[in-house]
Image: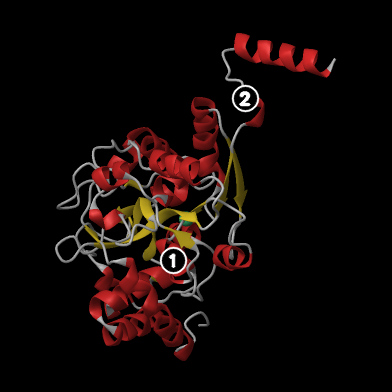
């Protein structure tokens, strides 16, 4: 009876064009702190074309702590800031990937020098400015955020948020601690209010007349524009890519890497390769409105529109200042201390 059933199940599987091992399909486990919606459709598509299952766990916070606690819970980790995987690498929580495809297709600035993780996509920390109150060309770079001209007119979220810590750590690696300390001090002087809420809330502050300029990630413009409630915030503002005549804009990197789990290394590597393939990149770029690590991937129209009219910006393409991650994360403690010293988050 048992054999009969197995045989008929096999016959069914074959007649459906499946392989005999279809019942025992591989499961790739993913741990991520990205917004689930950014990855779910990509995963579903990947499952269909590859006949594997992807089991994803999404955490809002504390990904590194979770990885330390359960280092082999997932095969692949995907994070919204590169700092997290750089730290994971330093903690010995990542496995080197081996992929000729990635080595051949991805530019060096998107590959960890030791091949432990890759950048999938990136987005600049840009300046949103009031269409009504800030003339084009009046604000061009990060230095404007600390110019006394904008005293009491700047909105920014908590200095301790991952985006700002990464941004300030990049500045520290790039310009030194003294320059960063005076930037943090100047920024606090210019704040319109106590830092609160997320990036979009700062843009909303411009819409509500609380401030004239704000620091936020670029993709929030297209996200706000596609949300009826937030559209007015987007419409009240425009995006300025900072420091295009200088070193370029600092970027947040979305990264992915293999954990030390040993069960599905080949399958997880294949998924990693897919994430930075043309098709995977198109998925990511179109759902996140971020910039692709792979060259030659078209940007969605909403991204091409960013920075329109700003000198040097063509079709949303901007000059980025890539500071190597191993230089960035060692600055974090010093940045936190500087924020503490001036009580950055309290007015
Ligand atoms: Fe975000």
Q: Quadrant of residue 86?
A: bottom left
Front: mark 2 or 1 = 2
Residue located beneath label 2 in the image? 22
Q: Is residue 209 above or below residue 338?
A: above
On the question of residue 339 being in view, the answer is yes
Callout 1: SS: helix
Which label was assigned to residue 161? Answer: none
Which residue lies most toward the right here? 1
In the picture, measured across the screen, residue 99 lies left or right of residue 196, that is: left
Q: Mark 2: give few (<14), some (14-19) or many (20+) Cα within 10 Å.
A: some
**Percent from the top left, x then y, of residue 164?**
42, 70
Q: Nearer the viewer, residue 143 or 253?
A: 253
Instruction: Identify the residue position indicated by label 1 in the image.
Output: 89
- Residue drawn 43% across and 51% down? 220
Rendered view: 107 above or below 139: above
The reply to whether residue 152 is in sight is no
- The answer to which image quadrant residue 105 occupies is top left
Badge 1: residue crowd in 10 Å (few <14, some 14–19, many ≥20): many
Q: In this view, does 272 lie above or below 88?
A: above
- Classify the position of the N terminus by image quarter: top right
Residue for point 54% across, 31% down:
47
Out of 116 and 253, give the one closest to the viewer. 116
Residue shown at the point (67%, 11%) measured from the top left: 12
Q: Describe the element under mark 2 as helix, strand or loop.
A: helix
Residue 197 horizontal side relative to residue 244, left or right: right
Spot occupied by residue 109 in the image (x, y as percentages of width and height): 26, 57
Front one among 160 and 52: 52
Relative to residue 180, is residue 109 depicted above or below?
Answer: above
């Amino acid at each position: 009876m048992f054999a009969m059933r197995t045989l008929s199940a096999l016959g069914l599987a074959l007649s459906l064009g499946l392989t005999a091992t279809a019942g025992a399909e591989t499961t790739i486990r993913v741990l991520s702190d990205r917004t689930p919606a950014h990855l779910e459709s990509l995963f579903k598509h990947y499952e269909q074309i590859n006949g594997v299952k992807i089991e994803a766990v999404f955490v809002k916070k504390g990904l590194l702590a979770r990885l330390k606690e359960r280092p082999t819970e997932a095969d692949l980790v995907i994070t919204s800031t590169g700092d997290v995987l750089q730290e994971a690498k330093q903690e010995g929580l990542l496995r080197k990937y081996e992929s000729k495809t990635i080595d051949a297709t991805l530019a060096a600035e998107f590959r960890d020098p030791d091949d432990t993780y890759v950048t999938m996509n990136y987005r600049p920390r840009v300046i949103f400015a009031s269409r009504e109150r800030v003339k084009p060309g009046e604000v061009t770079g990060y230095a404007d955020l600390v110019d006394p001209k904008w005293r009491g007119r700047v909105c920014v979220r908590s200095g301790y948020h991952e985006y700002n810590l990464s941004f300030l750590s990049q500045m520290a690696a790039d310009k030194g601690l003294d320059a960063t300390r005076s930037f943090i001090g100047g920024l606090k002087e210019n704040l319109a209010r106590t830092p609160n809420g997320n990036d979009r809330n700062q843009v909303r502050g411009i819409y509500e007349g609380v401030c004239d300029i704000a620091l936020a990630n670029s993709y929030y413009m297209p996200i706000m524009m596609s949300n009826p409630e937030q559209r007015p915030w987007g419409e009240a503002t425009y995006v300025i890519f900072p420091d295009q005549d200088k070193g370029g804009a600092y970027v947040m990197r979305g990264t992915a890497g293999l954990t030390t789990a040993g069960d599905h290394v080949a399958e997880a590597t294949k998924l990693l390769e897919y994430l930075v393939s043309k098709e995977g990149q198109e998925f990511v770029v179109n759902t996140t409105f971020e910039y692709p690590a792979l060259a030659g991937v078209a940007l969605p129209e909403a991204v091409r529109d960013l920075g329109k009219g700003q000198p040097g910006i063509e079709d949303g393409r901007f000059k980025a200042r890539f500071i190597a991650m191993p230089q960035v994360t060692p600055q974090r403690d010093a940045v936190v201390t500087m924020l503490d010293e001036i009580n950055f988050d309290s007015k």
